[in-house]
Amino acid sequence: AQTVTQSQPEMSVQEAETVTLSCTYDTSENNYYLFWYKQPPSRQMILVIRQEAYKQQNATENRFSVNFQKAAKSFSLKISDSQLGDTAMYFCAFMKQVGGGKLIFGQGTELSVKP
Amino acid sequence: GAVVSQHPSRVICKSGTSVKIECRSLDFQATTMFWYRQFPKQSLMLMATSNEGSKATYEQGVEKDKFLINHASLTLSTLTVTSAHPEDSSFYICSAFGTANTEAFFGQGTRLTVV
C-alpha cells in the first residue's frame, strides 16, 4: 500500500520570501504521478504542480517548483516570491500510473503568508 | 483543465432525512468518480470509488448502506447520505477521472450540516 507523509502541519512565511513544504511517500510502484494541491478557504482543490515519476527533470510552474528525489521517495514543493494569495492548505498526493485516478493524500500543511 | 460540477455547495438537513449530492463531469467522460470526506483542518479521506455501470467500491469502515453511491452515466455520480445524523456533518468532495486523463478533477465540494 502507498502512504504519503507531510510532517509539517503548519508553516508561515513572509510575503516575497521563499518557503519549502516537505513530502515523503512510500511505494513499491515504479511508475506513478505526484501532485501538490492547494486548498484555499473556499475549499476548492486546485492543482499546483504535477510530476511524472519517469521524468528526472523537476517540474516547475511559474513560482512553484518541486524537488523530486525518486530514490529517497521525497517530493518537496518550493514557493518563491510568496504572495498573500498563497495562504492555504497544501496537500501532497500520489497516484499510480495505472491507478484510474485514485489519489492518496498526505496530512496537509497549512501555509500562512504574512504581510 | 476539465470541469467537474458538484451540487449543492451547501445543504442543511434534519436528522433522519436523506440528502443527495451530485457530481457531474461537464466536458469529459468520467469512467471513474471518487467521493471524499474532509473534516476541518484534516486531509481528504477516500470513502468510495465508483465506476460507471457497476457497484461502488467502499473503503474500509465506510457504511455502504448509509452512503449510497450511484454512477449511472459517464457524466454523473451521486452520493446519497441516508438517515443522516449530526455526526455525518462534514465536507464532501468528488473527483472525476476519464480514461484519457492523467489527473483527477475535483468538484467544488458540499458542506453538509445535519441538525
Image (cartoon, grey):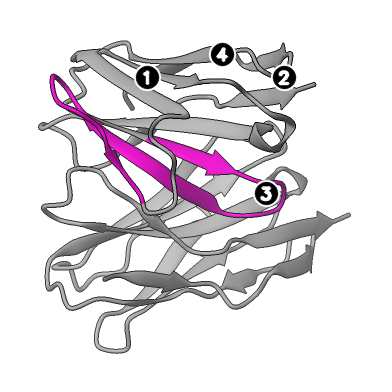
Residue A86 is marked as 3
Q: In the displayed structure, would residue A66 be above or below residue B3?
A: below
Percent position of residue B65, x then y: 41, 30
Circle 2: element type: loop
Looking at the rendered structure, whether the residues under marks 4 and 2 are on a common chain is answered as yes
- For the N terminus of chain A, the image quarter is bottom left
Residue plotted at (42% across, 70% down)? A4
Tell me the residue that label 4 is attached to.
B19
Asked whether the beta carbons under mark 4 and mark 2 sit within 8 Å of each other, the answer is: no
Magenta stretch: give its range: B35-59
Instruction: Work out whether residue B7 can be spotted.
Output: no
The extreme right residue here reads A115
Label 3 Cα crowd, 10 Å radius (few <14 / some 14-19 / many 20+) = some
Tell me the residue that label 2 is attached to.
B15
Give the residue type that dot 4 points to: Val
Tell me the residue that label 1 is attached to.
B3
- Say which quarter of the image contains residue A6: bottom right
Percent position of residue A64, x then y: 50, 57
Residue plotted at (74% across, 69% down)? A11
Label 4 Cα crowd, 10 Å radius (few <14 / some 14-19 / many 20+) = some
Of marks 1 and 4, which one's residue comes earlier in the chain?
1
Give the residue type that dot 3 points to: Asp
> How far, Cα to Cα, is label 1 from label 4?
23 Å
Label 2 Cα crowd, 10 Å radius (few <14 / some 14-19 / many 20+) = some
Of residue A11 and residue A99, the one placed in the foreground of this image is: A99
Asked whether the beta carbons under mark 1 and mark 4 sit within 8 Å of each other, the answer is: no
Asked whether the beta carbons under mark 4 and mark 3 sit within 8 Å of each other, the answer is: no
Give the residue type that dot 2 points to: Ser
Percent position of residue A63, x then y: 53, 55
